[in-house]
Amino acid sequence: MLTPYQAVYKTSTSGLSIKLSRSLSMDDNGDCRLTSNGKLLVAGINEVSVFAVDGDRVQPKSYVYQLSGPISRRREVHFNAESDTVRSLYKKNWYELPKSPDTLDRMSQQEQLRLMLLNDSTPREDMLFEVADGRKIKEYRLLYAGEERLETPMGWVDTLRFERDHDDPERQSSVWIAPDWDYLMVRTVHVEDGKTTEANLISASIAGAPVSGSSS
């Protein structure tokens, strides 16, 4: 079972930093709503994923990504339970993508990982996710890389580290998740084209209660 939370991340890349606010909430009909937004100068980023949870599975309904400002971009992914395809908006064009019962969007995939760990605290060595992204269904393969203790503004916390298996050896993606904090994402690092993008958790509350770590 997923619990509502609010979290703030400091994201940095190419010498610039931005604070991203992320929250998971549940509406009156039981749907989950995951949002992420931030603003840097005149540019704004907003992401929203709406999904349901059935047992140990996330069932996505819609995903919208909006970049506003001097450069404007919009992506959308829409799931229909009665259809075997997904509608995806990418660069102002709509695509029909094949859908399986396991197909997710980019945000709901992160909550599916949390849900899997909440239901089974023993990390799998190899986890495969199908993600509707742009013009295609992509495979996200996560490899368990072990435990790591991280220092955060809320104190020290033990985390599980996962690495994404990329076809391109020049690309690297890592994510750190804290079991004691409801498997909340604590840190991410992505390297591509020689550029590193890093996000670190700077504050969070779960079901209204602030998280805290240890002093050492």
Image (spheres, helix red, strand yellow):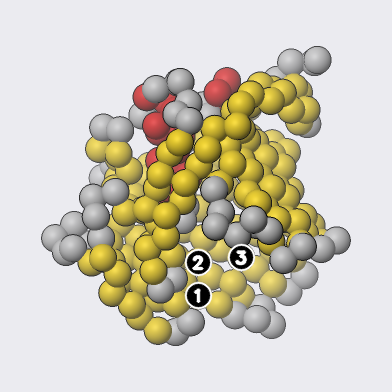
According to the picture, the residue beneath numbered tag 3 turns out to be: 45
Residue at 14 percent across and 60 percent down: it is 82
The amino acid type of the residue labelled 3 equals Ile
| Residue 184 visible, this orientation | no
Q: Nearer the viewer, residue 86 or 80?
A: 86
The residues bearing labels 2 and 3 have C-alpha atoms spaced at a distance of 8 Å
Task: Tell whether 203 sits left or right of 36.
Answer: right
The circle drawn on residue 74 is 1
Measured from the top left, where is residue 100 in percent x and y? Answer: 24, 55
Q: In the displayed structure, would residue 164 be above or below residue 93?
A: above
Q: Calculate the distance from the C-alpha at mark 1 to the C-alpha at mark 3.
A: 10 Å
Mark 1, other Cα within 10 Å: few <14 / some 14–19 / many ≥20: some
Q: Is residue 103 above or below residue 176?
A: below
Label 2 neighbourhood size at 10 Å, few (<14), some (14-19), many (20+)?
A: many
Tags 2 and 3 touching, CB below 8 Å: yes
* Total number of numbered discs in the rendering: 3
Relative horizontal placement of residue 65, taking residue 29 as reference (left or right): right
Q: Which residue position holds label 2?
A: 65
Is 172 above or below relative to 193? above
Identify the mark nearer the N-term, 2 or 3. Answer: 3
Position in image of residue 172 (x %, y %): 65, 51
Residue at x-position 56% and y-position 46%: 164
Mark 1 or mark 3, which has the lower sequence index?
3
What amino acid type is highlighted by mark number 2?
Answer: Tyr
Q: Secondary structure at mark 3?
A: strand
Which of the two discs, 2 and 1, labels the residue nearer the N terminus? 2
